[in-house]
Image (cartoon, helix red, strand yellow):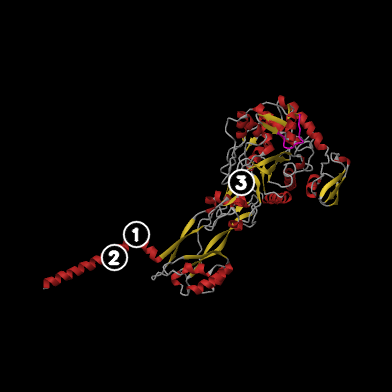
Amino acid sequence: MKSRLAILFLFFILLWGGLVFRGTSLKLFPGERLIHLQKRQFETSFVIKSRRGAILDRNGRDLAVSVATHSLFADPKLITEKKKLARVLAKELGLRSSTIYKKIKSKKRRFVWIRRNLNELQKKRIEALGERGLGFIEEPKRVYPNDRLLSQVIGFTGREGYGLEGLELAYDSVLSGSKKEVMVPRDARGRPLLSDARLLLDVGDGKDLFLTIDGDVQFQLEKELEEAIQEHEAESAIGIVLDVETSEVLAMANSPGYNLNQATLFPAEIRKNRVVTDAFEPGSTMKTFVVAAGLEMNRFRPSTIYDCEGGRLKIGRRWITEADAHHNFKKMTVAEILAKSSNVGSAKLGFDIGAKELRHFLSGLGFGHKYEDLLPGVSGGILQPLPWGKHLLSNVAFGHGVSVSALQMAQAYAAIANGGLLNSPRLVRSFRDPVTGEVNIRETPQGKRVISEDVASVLTLMLTQATSDEGTGAAARIPGYPVAGKTGTAQKVDMVNGGYLKGKYISSFAGFVPAHQPRYVIYVAVDAPRDNYYGSLVAAPLFAEIASYLMRKSGTPPVLISDNNVIEKKVDSIQQKALQEIKELVGKQKLKEKIPDLVGMSLREALKQIRNRAGEIKIHGSGQVVRMTPEPGTDLESFGKVHLYLEQK
């Protein structure tokens, strides 16, 4: 009996000893699994992102900022009168009480978000309820102070603070900074310790982005695009302004825009940055680079004469015709072909250059290639692979059978304005550390030569002639400043059924100012204008408004083209004579301004053509211009006053 009791006693001693040993070892050397269970029982966690870096324009003005807000969470287990609380919170937050009740009705859940990004007043009202199952966490919220300004370029963030479109997406990793996992402790009974519900988080903030964008120029560009849409009852319009020397983007606009603070309310089609994502047939703005290719390869000179066949050229079964039935061009020089925008003449230039050579030259200018590091969704356009048939070659020569983005076209004109050097476009100038204030400036890659300096000089003068009275771009001129540029009118492609949309065109203008000392490249395109659709009537006046603003803003002094200040650059012996011929022609045309034909135009359209070119304008009646004095073509220097007679139609 005694031995049995001893054995039983020994057994219990060993059992308790084992339990004590096990408990001590677990306390001193807990495994990962037990640590996880312990945290799960006594703590709850969630991830809070850092304050997102700001986006600013080149002058330091805020375009996108993050402000402190308060996010409401709850521990359903601690809430007693759930339905009553749901009704009270619904009234304060503008939510359905049923939505809130679904979140807090389960006692098994210990942490749920009720509403993110509340303001200070809402926070104080909810705190006054005295409900211990509610708490707040301070979080940053993305705010766009200018609403619609630069909307498609900036993009926006989602509810969790991640970039979804535009620059917000492209530079999300830079703007986001670091993130932190926040642990909310619980007491022995599993209740969160919410006595100090406001959590201030020490996490690494994201870096600030300084853009190349000038906020003032951006505002003016968007304003002019909106007015052009209203005036011409167009579907949309796009525009871009580049710094000639660096290809920095000073403005990039899509109209209509959208409110960045309510981005999800707008359809994806409106939110697209069509300046970089959409490719379209450019029309006659492409003719400039056909001429450039031929001059670069010495296939012709500006004074070389071509037979333009009276405006009709047959290629196989198809006919090449001019954009306007009244343009029955016969023999013209290369300079005139560009200035008057002859399709037949451009086709013949393409034939003399050759498909292989022309495609190689256009590819070197960036057509068919993407600027992928600029923004998400950038289009490379379409530059068909070889071989090209004669019909395709002729189409490409006058801007059809090839598609480009507005950015690509602006870049190509910037190469001419920059003396033949093609730079990479830039949207971001620098990054700034929010803590140290250190600024890291992005390096600018060295430009590559795509056109010789001599040819770029001649092209500039030819493009200046294209904005003379004899050219299609006369409406792009601005008082006191020589303008170099080219109009474009192209049928709109039917992306669903193929072919072209009947009666729908894209009217565009590409150019730079001032022509003798280029500073700004401007490209604008108006999609499907309903009244007039020619680039000369729709896009050229739009260009003039933007260019005039840029000249005023920059303080560039006005000039007149003459032998003393026209572009003077050394040219080779082959082009010397042609350069002198064009220089003299342009000088004569620019020094003697002629009154354009305004009959049939609206008052706004007429004023764009004549404003600041006549000493005084007298308006009689309302509606469209039916008569004018003096007659169109009269030298303005002979008359200080122009009378416009209008009638309603």
Amino acid type of the residue tagged 2 in the rendering: Gly
Task: Calculate the distance from the C-alpha at mark 2 to the C-alpha at mark 3.
Answer: 63 Å
Q: Quadrant of residue 329?
A: top right
Name the mark on residue 427: 3
Nearer to us: label 2 or label 1: 1
Q: Position of residue 171 (x, y in %)?
A: 55, 49
Q: Position of residue 503 (x, y in %)?
A: 69, 44
Q: Main secondary structure of the magenta part?
A: loop
First in residue order: circle 2 vs circle 1 = 2
Q: Can you name the residue that lies furthest to the top here?
A: 573
Which element type, helix, strand or loop, lies under badge 3?
loop
Q: Position of residue 322 (x, y in %)?
A: 72, 35
Residue under circle 2? 23
Give the vertical position of 262 relative to 461 (above or below): below
Amino acid type of the residue tagged 1 in the rendering: Arg
Residue under circle 1? 33
The stretch of residues the image draws in magenta is 321-330
**Residue 124: in sight, yes or no?**
no
Task: Calculate the distance from the C-alpha at mark 1 to the C-alpha at mark 3.
Answer: 50 Å
Q: Position of residue 569 (x, y in %)?
A: 72, 31
